[in-house]
Amino acid sequence: MKPAKPGFTRSPALRLVTLAALVASAVLLAPRLAVASPIFPVEVQSHLGSKSLPACTLCHSTLSGGIGTAITPFGKTVKGSGASAANLGSLDGALDAMKNKHTDGDGDCVGDIDELVAGTDPNSGADNPGACDGGSAVPPTGGGATAPDPQYGCAAGAGAPVGPTSFAAAAVLGAWAWLRRARRRKT
C-alpha cells in the first residue's frame, strides 16, 4: 500500500462528497442564457395567431440554438425588445412592443410582426420587393389575407437542446469517468 500524501486523504466518502459538490456547482452555475427555448416557436405562433410554426432559425443561426446564436435581424430585435431565454412573458412583451413600434429588422418597409403573421420572412427583404416604394407586399396584421406557409428555416425543434441539462450530463459523465479511473489506479 502506498503512503498517503501529506494533506490528502483518499477516503471514498470524501471523494463522493467532492464529486457531488462538483456536479451541483456545474448545474447551478451553468449560464441560464444558454438555454435554448424550444417553447418559443409555439408561443410566437400562438401569441401572434399565425397559421405557421416559425423555425428556431427565425432568431438563431443554428437549428439547435445555443450561446450566441440568436443573431438574425429578428433575433437581435426581439432580444433588444426585452425577450429573455425561457421566459414566455418577456417574449410576449417583446412581440407586443415590436408590433406597436412596427419594427422592421430586415429593412423592407414591412413590420416584422406583420411579416410573421402573413407568412413571409422578417429576416429577408427579398420576399417583399417594392414595399419601400409605396407598395404593400404584405397586408397589415389582422388584414384577413391568407398567405402561404413561411418558407424559411427548418422545422422548429430540430436538433438537440443546448443548456444546463446538456452541461450537467457532460459533468456527470466526466465525474463517472474520473471515479472509474481512480478506482482502477487503486487496485
Image (cartoon, rainbow, N blue to C red):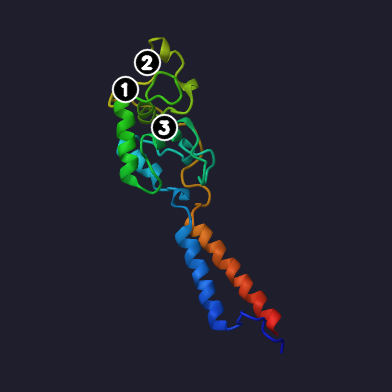
Q: Please tell me whether mark 2 or mark 3 is closer to you in this view.
A: 3
Measure how far apart labels 1 and 3 are at the Cα level: 19 Å
- Location of residue 9 in the rendering, given as x and y in whole percent from the top left corner: 60, 82
Determine contact: label 1, label 3, CB under 8 Å. Answer: no
Q: What type is the residue that disc 3 sits on?
A: Thr
The picture quadrant where one finds residue 114 is top left
Residue 136, label in figure: 2
Q: Residue at x 30, y 38 (%)?
A: 93
Q: Secondary structure at mark 2?
A: loop
Q: Secondary structure at mark 3?
A: helix
- Location of residue 49 in the rendering, given as x and y in whole percent from the top left corner: 31, 36
Between discs 2 and 3, the one toward the N terminus = 3
Q: Quadrant of the C terminus?
A: bottom right
- Find disc 1 in the rendering and name its residue: 140
Q: Please tell me whether mark 1 or mark 3 is closer to you in this view.
A: 3
Name the foreground residue: 7 vs 122: 7
- Find disc 3 in the rendering and name its residue: 77
Q: Is residue 93 above or below residue 168?
A: above
Q: Residue at x 36, y 34 (%)?
A: 81
Q: Residue at x 40, y 39 (%)?
A: 53
Determine contact: label 2, label 1, CB under 8 Å. Answer: yes
The answer to whether residue 146 is seen in the rendering is yes
Q: What type is the residue that disc 2 sits on?
A: Ser
